[in-house]
């Protein structure tokens, strides 16, 4: 495809005082790829995502996006370059209606739209995530899955070149999970580049082209979901070394 | 989003009538009521300008006296050499510039530090002006002699009020206004949808500061003699905060609902109980805050939506059972 990858992370490191949450992690994501970022709790996955989205600044290392260095840029500038995200704990804009939440993602980001165009686009996106006709609902009083859908619509509203999903499927019941997986599959099929932090193994197996496994802040495996989940280091990271 | 709704046309019509009535006051009275009207107009302008910034951001600014004093001094220093209109515009520009510098330095701080800093700012500007005057000129105060009477001051203030309301309304409809609502909900989300949070706040602070500076400039002819303790009086900053909060800052016309009754109340108390003014005003504040925790605008909202109020009361009663 293109000469250089869409996202490339080189030796990224994040320290919180003495704790090293992300240690010398390097990987790259090609245009159109769906990459799963997995690992046990506390392995640094969300921190890695936060370094890419600009919520946290890396202590060392280099992150570039579309051939341009974005290391340490403020989050709003990274968002304007075309990286959108959802949050591990959903963050609806509670005093805004559902459709305003989606417009929020469209009005300031990568591809900016405003006024009637933004309304139309937001209506389409609400339909896309399964919230048609719910535009005027106050987002603060929606159910958990609906708020997750809304957050996805908000992230998609700026037509991002890279979508970061932080445990977007967590906390859903089996029926909702099926819907959620189908939604992400739909995004992958239309060629969107996605990095998803996830714990739900079924989702990872069925969705991800490639998996990156982190443990204690370091990358321990990188490859196809099937191969990676069979590696002894990965099994021991999840289950402990006696079982390996 | 882009078309004006009929409710907005009604608001505009009511505002125009209100403005026309207020502008006609000097035709009927040139004594007590005119003077009271000017007082009301001053606080409507200051409180509404203050609310443009502090309403959506929830930052309590005590820099009102700094911007106001700068406006007064701009006119005081330039009145001999430049036309009044030029000085009014200059006052706005200088106040906005100060707001941008201060905003960039402090709006990254959390609320409490910002409050203290703005209070200190007014004092700092006052001390600098005093120092400059005692060291480089031989007078402490400045005289402002113009042909403006009380009625001209009223008309200028009413025109300024109209501009402030129009600006606030335009901001609310713009991306900046929408950005402020998002910031008010969740700053982290605001950053991640591409909003430059710090700069949005600085822009609003500058707009608000500019209007307060212009108000100070317009009022300079009324005071005729300007000196630092009166131009940079910190009590003004507190009065503006109190009146704006009493009216309610959730909407732009909220402060209006606070300013009109409270200016009349203060006037009544200071006229009839000159020896106990502070005491009675203190009691009045406590009573008002106790009775109207969300400001007058909260009361108006409850009256306009009686069902919603009853619903809320019912659900809270159920919750306590």
Image (cartoon, helix red, strand yellow):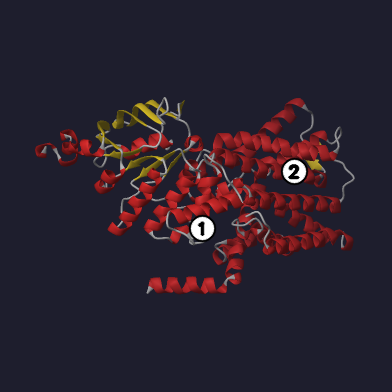
Question: At numbered mark 2, what does the secondary structure look like: helix, strand or loop?
Answer: helix
The reply to whether residue A58 is in sight is: no
Tell me the crowding category of disc 1: few under 14, some 14 to 19, or many 20 or more residues within 10 angstroms, Cα based. Answer: some
Could you tell me which secondary element the residue under label 1 belongs to?
loop
Residue located beneath label 2 in the image: B214
Q: Horizontal and vertical percent for residue B21?
A: 81, 62
**Mark 1 belongs to which subunit?**
A
Q: Chain of mark 2?
A: B
Work out whether residue B203 or residue B287 is closer to the camera in this orientation and state it: B203
Q: Nearer the viewer, mark 2 or mark 1?
A: 1
Q: Residues within 10 Å of mark 2 (few under 14, many from 20)?
A: many
Q: Which mark is residue A97?
A: 1
Out of B227 and B35, give the one closest to the viewer. B35
Residue pictured at 34% horizontal, 42% vertical: A196
Could you say where residue B236 lies in the image, as x and y percent from the top left? Answer: 67, 48
The structure residue drawn at horizontal position 79% and vertical position 29%, both measured from the top left corner, is B138
Tell me the residue at 81%/49% (across/down).
B156
**Which residue is located at x 35 percent, y 51 percent?**
A182
Q: Vertically, is A128 above or below A74?
A: below
Q: Are marks 2 and 1 in contact (CB under 8 Å)?
A: no
Quadrant of the frame with the C terminus of chain B: bottom left
């Amino acid at each position: 495809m293109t000469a250089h990858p869409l996202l490339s992370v080189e030796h990224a490191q994040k320290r919180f005082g003495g704790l090293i949450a992300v240690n010398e992690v390097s990987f790259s994501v090609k245009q159109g790829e769906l990459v799963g970022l997995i690992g046990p709790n506390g392995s640094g996955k969300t921190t890695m995502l936060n370094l890419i989205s600009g919520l946290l600044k890396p202590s060392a290392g280099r992150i570039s996006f579309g051939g341009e260095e974005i290391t340490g840029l403020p989050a709003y500038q990274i968002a304007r370059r075309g990286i959108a995200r959802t949050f591990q704990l959903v963050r609806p804009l509670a005093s805004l209606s559902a459709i305003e939440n989606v417009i929020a993602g469209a009005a300031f980001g990568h591809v900016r739209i405003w006024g009637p165009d933004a309304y139309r686009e937001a209506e389409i996106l609400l339909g896309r995530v399964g919230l048609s006709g719910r535009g005027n609902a106050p987002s603060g009083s929606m159910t958990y899955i609906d708020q997750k859908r809304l957050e996805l619509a908000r992230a998609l509203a700026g037509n991002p070149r890279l979508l970061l999903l932080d445990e977007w499927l967590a906390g859903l019941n089996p029926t909702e999970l099926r819907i959620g997986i189908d939604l992400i599959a739909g995004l992958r099929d239309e060629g969107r580049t996605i990095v998803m932090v996830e714990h739900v193994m079924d989702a990872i197996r069925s969705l991800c082209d490639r998996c990156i496994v982190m443990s204690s802040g370091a990358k321990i495996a990188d490859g196809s979901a099937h191969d990676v989940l069979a590696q002894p280091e990965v099994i021991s990271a999840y289950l402990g070394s006696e079982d390996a | 989003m882009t078309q004006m709704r009929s409710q907005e046309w009604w608001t505009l019509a009511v505002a125009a009538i209100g403005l026309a009535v207020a502008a006609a006051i000097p035709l009927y009275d040139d004594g007590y009521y005119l003077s009271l009207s000017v007082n009301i107009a001053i606080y409507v302008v200051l409180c509404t300008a203050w609310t443009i910034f502090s309403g959506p951001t929830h930052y309590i600014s005590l820099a009102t006296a700094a911007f106001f004093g700068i406006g007064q001094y701009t006119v005081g220093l330039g009145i001999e050499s430049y036309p009044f209109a030029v000085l009014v515009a200059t006052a706005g520009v200088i106040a906005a510039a100060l707001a941008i510098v201060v905003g960039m330095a402090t709006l990254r701080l959390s609320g409490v530090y910002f409050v203290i800093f703005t209070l200190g700012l007014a004092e700092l500007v006052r001390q600098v002006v005093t120092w400059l005057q005692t060291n480089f000129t031989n007078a402490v105060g400045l005289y402002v002699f113009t042909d403006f009477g009380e009625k001209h001051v009223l008309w200028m203030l009413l025109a300024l009020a109209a501009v402030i309301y129009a600006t606030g309304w335009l901001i609310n409809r713009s991306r900046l206004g929408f950005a402020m609502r998002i910031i008010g909900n969740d700053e982290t989300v605001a950053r991640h949808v591409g909003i430059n949070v710090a700069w949005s706040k600085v822009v609003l602070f500058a707009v608000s500061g500019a209007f307060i500076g212009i108000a100070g400039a317009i009022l300079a002819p009324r005071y005729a003699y300007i000196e630092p303790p009166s131009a940079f009086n910190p009590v003004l900053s507190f009065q503006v905060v109190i009146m704006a909060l009493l009216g309610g800052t959730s909407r732009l016309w909220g402060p209006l609902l606070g300013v009109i009754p409270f200016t009349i109340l203060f006037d009544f108390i200071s006229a009839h109980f000159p020896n106990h003014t502070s005491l009675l005003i203190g009691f009045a504040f406590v009573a008002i805050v106790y009775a109207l925790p969300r400001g007058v605008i909260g009361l108006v909202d409850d009256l306009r939506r009686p069902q919603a109020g009853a619903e809320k009361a019912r659900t809270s009663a159920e919750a306590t059972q």
